[in-house]
Amino acid sequence: MNDANDKTHLVDRITGHRRMRRNRKADWTRRLVRENRLTVDDLIWPVFVIPGENIEEPIPAMPGVSRMSVDRLAEAACKAEALGIPAIATFPNIELEKRDMNGSEILNPDNLINRATRAIKKAAPVSA
C-alpha cells in the first residue's frame, strides 16, 4: 500500500473508528459541546432542623453536616443566600412524643417545619 494513501493514522486502531477531535481543539468549543454543566443555580441545600435554641450538632454519619435549631438555620440561610444557593430543603427531626400514626403534628400551625420555614423566609427572602 502506498504511504501517501495510508490513512490509518486517522483511525483509532482499537475501535477502528475515526476519533473526532475537532470539538476539543479550543476552549470555547469544548465549553460549547460539553454535556454537563453544574452551577450554583442547580443546587438545593438539605438542612436538618431540630427543636431548641442556639443548637448545632454534627451528624456523625455525614461529615460537615449538622442538625440546627431554627435560629441557627436562619443564620445559615443568610449565608446560603449570599452564596447564591437558590433553594433549601428542610428535614425536621420531630420529637418522639409528638409523632403518631396519622402525622397529626403537621396540622399544628406552630410546628417545627413551619417555624423553620418562617425563619428562612424572614432571614433570606430570595431563597425562600
Image: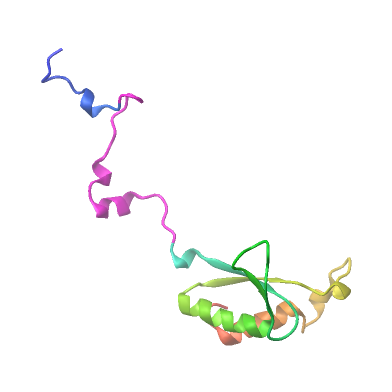
Residue 72: image location, x then y, percent: 63, 83
Q: Is residue 19 above or below residue 81?
A: above
As drawn, the residue found furthest toward the top would be 1
| Left/right of residue 105 with respect to residue 127 in the rendered view | right
Tell me the residue at 68%/65% (across/down): 60
Give the side of residue 119 with respect to residue 103, left or right.
Answer: left
Q: Is residue 111 left or right of residue 11?
A: right
Could you say where residue 35 lies in the image, as x and y percent from the top left?
40, 49
On whether residue 21 falls in the magenta region, the answer is: yes
Magenta-highlighted stretch: main secondary structure?
loop
Res 24 seen here = yes
Residue occupying image coordinates x 59% and y 87%: 122
Is 20 magenta? The answer is yes
Q: Nearer the viewer, residue 62 or 104?
A: 62
Q: Quadrant of the N terminus?
A: top left
Above or below, comparing residue 21 to residue 47 in the picture: above
Q: Which residues are magenta?
A: 13-38
Can residue 126 be seen in the rendering of this structure?
Answer: no
